[in-house]
Image (cartoon, helix red, strand yellow):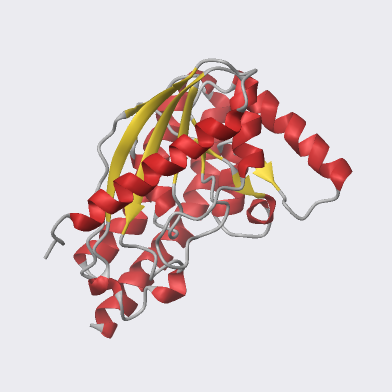
Amino acid sequence: MKLRGYVALLVVCIGLILTDLVQRFVITPWVLLRPSRRVAVLGGWINFMARLVTRPLVRIGGAHIPVPERLVPAEPGVLILMNHQSLFDIPLVVQSVEGGYPRIVTRKRYGRWIPLISQMTRLYQYPLVDPSANPGTMRKTYKELRQVARTSDMPIAVFPEGTRSRDGGIRPFRKKGASLLLRARPWKVYVLVSDGFWKHPRFKDFLGGLSDIRGRVALAGVLEWTDPKADPDPFLDQVRTLMEAELERLRAEPRTA
């Protein structure tokens, strides 16, 4: 089984190296020269990469990684809130969007020096945040985040727990970022919940254990946020309660063989 894990990860790594070159020298110039095709091209490309990351791990490594239903519309005023267990959350949230792609709120450290990922944050205009920044920098970051929220023509996705859960449960929310988004405009909020991935949060955890991954993902609910002037804390508490209930439901279902 360990050999299958090594081979699957090797296939993914080779694929990511090749797609980094394609993204830099084909996809990026394409969307610059044909801006009218931006959504279609970038939506298709990011879904291809989501499959590239997950399907070898399924077909070679023996993992069970579901393909989410495309229930989230690619349109302005859509906010995706999802729990955070592992790197798999990224392809899962990507594949949940129909007809486009999400703009994922991302830590600033991923915006530099990481092959494929850093260039992707610029290409897809992901909002970048740095929780360790000084107050002046944070004020600028929050201003930019509000501007993105008001003007984005694609859904915004955020993991309100802030960091990956170590036991798979729903961690307390770090509410600042999500609160800023909620205060920026009315939203239709899609709440997604995944489970079964928390023991394999990073690439190095995939080796030897892929066949143990029995993941699942579900839409916990769709909520309306209609008053940006309202206190967002009770709403975020409602979202967390909804996530906890959906996680409990998922765990009560029989495991996929």
Q: Nearer the viewer, residue 165 or 216?
A: 165
Q: Where 10 sits versus 186, above or below?
A: below
Q: Quadrant of the C terminus?
A: bottom left
Q: Is residue 54 left or right of residue 130?
A: left
Determine the image quadrant of residue 80.
top left
Residue 116 in the image: state x and y as whole percent.
54, 54
For the view shown, which residue lies furthest in the right direction?
A: 136
The residue located at (61%, 18%) in the rendering is 228
Q: Where 235 sits versus 49, above or below?
A: above
Residue 33 in the image: state x and y as whole percent.
56, 25
- The answer to whether residue 123 is visible is yes
Q: Where 165 sits versus 78, above or below?
A: below
Residue 235 in the image: state x and y as whole percent.
51, 31
The residue located at (52%, 36%) in the rendering is 236
The residue located at (37%, 64%) in the rendering is 12
For the view shown, which residue lies furthest in the bottom direction?
A: 2
Q: Nearer the viewer, residue 27 or 253?
A: 253
Q: Is residue 142 left or right of residue 224?
A: right
Determine the image quadrant of residue 85.
bottom left
- The answer to whether residue 127 is visible is no
Determine the image quadrant of residue 210.
bottom left
